[in-house]
């Protein structure tokens, strides 16, 4: 698969220009286009999304629909319906807790992440109903999209703990069960990160694998395939995703000179990813 990323919202092309460009791309070997879904850009962009969809379909190439919301970040995004922004404040037990209680994006309740343990439990069924509705709605804009793609770039450990979640009591209890560490459920965030970082990373990778499995199930129920992206060296994540994905988009080291040395780097990374996924 040779896919070209085609972000909606940065620029538009005239119909004739777009048709010729896609024809040349396909002739050069491009087999799919990865496009975003952002309904908040207004009718002009919706019209362009329809034009892009129809032009790609006429060329014989496939459409991969990049859809992060609300799976990855859980913030309020313009143009999406009120399903998630209404659900999250009504379910405070579903709010994720950042390391030492400090949100990355501010204190707005709709900008907090969801609790990983909550959404992977039976209690989180309402969250997955929202994901299903959002993805089904995206297909009304791109009805012939063959695959959904999510960009998974969470850092489950960081040097100072910033951006890491979820440290609520429910997650700490789940961590204690997963790690087998006695008393870890009562430990401070700092103690967990400083003294049990590797076990925490393994626990969070396990949860991420569970979430990816649920995503694949959701997308399959809509009759599409599912792919996720993360960096190539995210070993624990890829191991947790084994057998759950239709395709893995492993971010290889990029932006280098196209020479034989860099080709060797790419080949080695590709071989390593095949053993992990």
Image: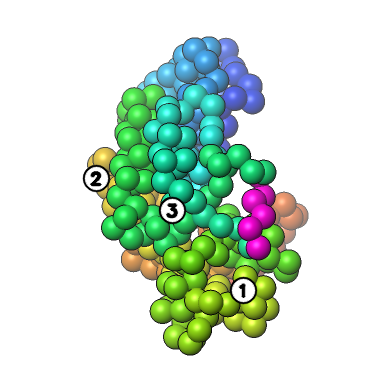
Where residue 155 appears, as percent x and y from the top left, is: 61, 61
Residue corresponding to mark 3: 93
As displayed, is residue 93 above or below residue 57? Answer: below
Q: Residue 73 carries which label?
A: none
Q: Is residue 102 magenta?
A: yes
Secondary-structure class at tag 2: helix
- Mark 3 and mark 1 in contact? Answer it, CB < 8 Å: no
Reading the chain from its start, which is encountered first: label 3 or label 2?
Answer: 3
Horizontal arrangement in the rendering, residue 200 relative to residue 253 (left or right): left
The Cα–Cα distance between marks 2 and 1, rounded to whole angstroms, is: 40 Å
SS for tag 1?
Answer: loop
| Residue drawn 46% across the image and 48% down it | 92
Is 103 above or below relative to 82?
below
x, y percentage for residue 195? Answer: 64, 82
- Crowd band around label 1 with a 10 angstrom C-alpha radius: few (<14), some (14–19), many (20+): some
Q: Is residue 29 visible?
A: no
The residue shown at (50%, 84%) is 183
Q: Where residue 62 sits: x, y (%)?
A: 39, 36
Earlier sequence position, callout 2 versus callout 1:
1
Q: Which residue is at the front of the view, 198 or 273?
A: 198
How many marks can you see?
Answer: 3
Residue 56, placed above or below residue 114: above
Q: Nearer the viewer, residue 157 or 270?
A: 157
Instruction: Please indicate, yes or no, whether residue 174 appears anywhere in the rendered image.
Output: yes
**Does the stretch in magenta take in 3?**
no
- Residue at image point 43% right, 19% down: 50
Q: Which of marks 3 and 2 is in front?
A: 3
Which mark identifies residue 188? 1
Residue 258 picture quarter: bottom right
The residue beneath circle 2 is 221
Residue stretch in magenta: 100-105
């Amino acid at each position: 698969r040779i896919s070209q990323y085609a972000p909606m919202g940065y620029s538009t092309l005239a119909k004739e220009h777009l048709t010729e460009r896609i024809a040349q791309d396909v002739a050069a070997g491009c087999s799919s286009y990865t496009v975003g879904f952002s309904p908040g850009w207004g009718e002009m962009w919706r019209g362009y999304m329809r034009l892009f969809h129809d032009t790609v379909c006429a060329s014989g190439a496939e459409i991969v629909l990049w859809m992060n919301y609300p799976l990855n970040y859980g913030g309020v995004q313009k143009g999406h319906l009120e399903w998630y922004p209404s659900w999250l404040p009504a379910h405070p037990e579903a709010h994720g807790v950042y390391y030492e209680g400090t949100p990355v994006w501010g204190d707005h309740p709709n900008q907090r992440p969801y609790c990983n343990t909550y959404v992977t439990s039976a209690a989180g069924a309402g969250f997955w109903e929202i994901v299903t509705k959002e993805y089904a709605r995206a297909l009304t804009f791109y009805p012939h999209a063959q695959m959904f793609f999510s960009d998974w770039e969470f850092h489950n450990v960081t040097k100072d703990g910033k951006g890491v979640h979820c440290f609520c009591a429910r997650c700490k209890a789940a961590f204690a069960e997963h790690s087998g560490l006695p008393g870890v459920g009562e430990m401070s965030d700092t103690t967990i990160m400083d003294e049990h970082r590797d076990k925490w990373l393994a626990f969070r990778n396990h949860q991420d694998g569970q979430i990816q499995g649920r995503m694949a199930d959701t997308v399959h129920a809509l009759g599409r395939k599912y792919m996720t992206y993360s960096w190539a060296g995210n070993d624990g994540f890829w191991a947790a995703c084994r057998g759950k994905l239709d395709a893995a988009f492993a971010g290889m080291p990029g932006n280098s000179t196209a020479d034989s040395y860099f080709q060797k780097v790419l080949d080695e990374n590709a071989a390593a990813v095949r053993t992990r996924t």
